[in-house]
Amino acid sequence: MTTESETFAAIDLGSNSFHMIVASSVDKRIQIIDKLKDNVRLAGGLDEKQKLTDEAIAVAMNCLTKFGQRIREIPSDNIRVVGTNTLRLAKNGSTFLKKARQALGHPVEIISGREEARLIFLGVAYSNFNDTEQRLVIDIGGGSTELAIGRGYHAHMVESLYMGCVNMSSRFFPTGEITTKKMRKAILFARQEFEPLEIIYKRVGWDSVYGSSGTIQAIRDIINLTDNGEISIKPANLFRLKDEIIAAGHINNLKFNGLPPTRAQVLAGGVAVLCAAFEALNLENMHVSDGALREGLVLDLIGRQHDQDIRDKSVDELMKRYNVDAEHAARVEQTALDLFSQIGDKWSMDTDTDQKMLRWAAKLHEIGLAIAHSQHHKHAAYLIANSELAGFSRQEQSMLAMLIRCHRRKFPAREELVRLPEELHDKLYKLAVLIRLSVVINRGRTGPEYTGLRISAADAYLKIEFPDGWLAGHPLTEADLTTEADYLSVINYTLEFS
């Protein structure tokens, strides 16, 4: 029997380069079939107010338009596009995201630094799999440096530091001049960034070290061509390269074999970060991986398609951490899914993404009780918005937090929804209505007494029909539904029940 292959695409909007890979998957085995890269240098486009310049956005859109042509025939569910450090920092990021969506024909997710580190570890693990040794993975990007320690495909320590080859080069070598003093200052700054991690990471330990990203690959390539085919990075090779960079005196004089001109512009900053890493963590040898963030994205996508979504695990871990009543959460979840199955199509909701968001909200809607019963929906929203949830993008996390914020009492004012794009507000309200009704119906916390419930919907109108005599036997639920109808009227929804 032949297994049909699927095609996936992953796009990484990095601070220095934009990367895209297209891969096919058969029985969860990945084969890379296409790679595209463009040195956009997005981090260099941030002005003094941390806004991307019009010129930087135009260069980025030109690249994304080309990427968009390549992914046009790939199913949307099999595509993931993420932005990293520069887009995390950009004050006008929402403007960039709108234009990027138009250019690509697909939305862009902003991921946290730690989520980036997790995905990088996953990509390195795929390219160099070994489930027996514990690995330290270091990735020097354009605007940040990610570290992760783990085994197999699982990273159990992740961190992101705000320094990369682009911002370090512009900070310490702004005119292109490279001196011993400037390099020493750059390495000392990087050492200060690593300092809080040194003891913790050394205590955990590792069996091997892997580096990824264009900076580390470029350093490996230079060493390979100048040191008799050396395939890894060792302290002696690295620090000799640092001295040669200083001797060159200027970035325009960096003419190493195997070094692309675009990489030469940011090599000094990247070498400073790597030297600091070797010193801070006492590294003796670093292997270099071809796998990185985009390969991790593809693996993560395949996991989502085959019911191995890391986001489910993150939600379950959060439930345990805050001692959620799992039985009650399961009842609310089941009711919400039942309601969704009856009116999801009528409301044009997505049976995958919207249903998952509803499930997660049902499971986590009571985590705020760990802080206080009063205003626990607000406490829950804060916990979710400010937790590190593996697998979630910033927008997904904001959506989940706001959905739980809306699960009881008054709806927040529209100006409170600033973290969500305006086009998601209507979806938020629809999902909130379903979770609110599920909570009301299960407020007795005694089991699924709603068997036979029917719900119908048309735009902002809802009608619930209970089995004959059910409401008469549940007067508190009837009173709660009356109150709920008043809450929903504020957002112009009409609720009727009988």
Image: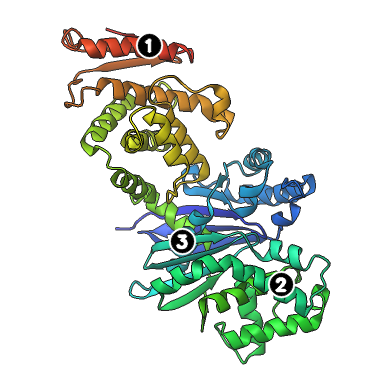
Label 2 SS = helix
Q: Nearer the viewer, mark 1 or mark 2?
A: 2
Residue 286 visible in the snapshot: yes
Q: What is the three-letter code of the residue carrying label 3? A: Val
How far apart, in angstroms, are the residues tagged by discs 1 and 2?
63 Å
Q: Nearer the viewer, residue 321 or 80?
A: 321
Q: Answer with left or right where residue 447 lies relative to residue 341.
A: left
The reply, left or right, for residue 26 in relation to residue 164 is: left
**Disc 1 designates what residue?**
485
Q: Amino acid at mark 1?
A: Ala
Query: Where residue 471 sits in the image (x, y, percent)?
Result: 21, 10
Name the residue beneath numbered marker 2. Answer: 185
- State the residue position of label 3: 158
Q: Above or below — where is 399 with respect to 79?
A: above
The disc at residue 474 is none
Q: Nearer the viewer, residue 19 or 178?
A: 178
Cα gap from disc 3 to disc 1, whole angstroms:
45 Å
